[in-house]
Structure formats: structure tokens, C-alpha cells
Amino acid sequence: MKIKTKNAPLEINKIEEFETNYGFKIPTEFRNFLLENNGIYFKPMLFDLEVQNEITTFCTNSIYSIHNNKDFDIEWIRSLTRENIEQNGFYINDSDCFIFIAPEYDNEIYLGIKGKYYGKVYLVDKVNEDGIETKLHLIANNFSEFLNMLRESDIEPYDENEVFN
């Protein structure tokens, strides 16, 4: 993975504060990632996923931080998730069981933080025919497995600010 930028490591007390504020424990593998990186931007990376019996390739260029005093960290996104879901007309069952950890062009990548979803990584497919029910696809059984799925692409790097517009 060719890292473009990465944030300073996060201190454990910041993670614990975040967990207390939102009422869940961050899965160990993602916690370790945050302690080392607290978010990174990298050259676009691809991963494959079976969707409706076909292998589909998806792309991401970052993994969000928890809190770095900038826009687009998980804490800021978490505060907007339910409002964003309702305003943009897509819906995730059990939305309080996930945190948004990475962009995927028209979709989003979430980490399960509660119940049967805990520790697993999911693609939230917002682009669907009816515009009402969003599709949730399991990408990986844990964060490390997700990172290991990523492969380099020939896609030209883009400005990370474009991902969020």
C-alpha cells in the first residue's frame, strides 16, 4: 500500500473517550490500526466482492481517523450518520451497529461495532434501483482481512477532498 498521508498515532485515552461517548468498544484490530496510524490516505486500492452472483471490483483511497481535528474523521461522521441516512434516502438496518471507516466512490465501507456485526467489515451499497433499501454486503470477517484484500490499481490518485463531495 502506497501511503500518501497518515495521521499521528492516536493515544489510547482518545480511543477510550470515543468509546465512552458513543457506547461501544472498537474491535481490537481497528483499535491497533488507530493506535499506529489514526487514519491514512493512500493511492487508490481495489478489492473484489461477490454481489448478486457476480464478482464486482470496488475501490477506496483512505481509512478514516477517529479524531484529528479535521473534517471527515469518524467522530464527526458518526455524529451525522443517522441524519445523513435519513436525508439521503438510504437506510441501513441496525445503523447504530456500524461506524463509517472508509469511502468507496458511490458507496461506503463500515465496521461492525455491535452484536452479530462486531469486528466485520461491510460495503454499504447505496446505489440501488428502488432507492429505499440499501444493500449491506460482508467484505471481510475482520479489519486485517479487509486490509489484506486490497490490491494496487492503475487508477490515478485523486484529491481526497473529491471523495467527500
Image: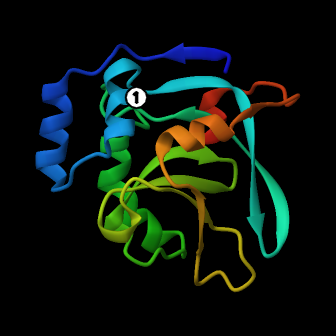
Residue beneath the point at 57% across and 24% down? 41
- Residue 162 x %, y %: 66, 36
Residue beneath the point at 49% across and 76% down? 91
Q: Tell whether 101 sits left or right of 31.
A: right
Residue beneath the point at 84% across and 61% down? 55
Q: Quadrant of the C terminus?
A: top right
Residue behind mark 1: 33
Kind of residue at badge 1: Phe
Q: Is residue 164 visible?
A: no
- Residue 1 x %, y %: 67, 21
Q: State the image quarter where residue 54 is shown.
A: bottom right
Residue beneath the point at 41% across and 20% down? 37
Q: State the image quarter where residue 71 is shown.
A: top left
- Residue 74 x %, y %: 37, 42
Which residue is at the front of the view, 156 or 10?
Answer: 10
- Residue 155 x %, y %: 85, 31
Q: Is residue 27 above or below residue 161?
A: below
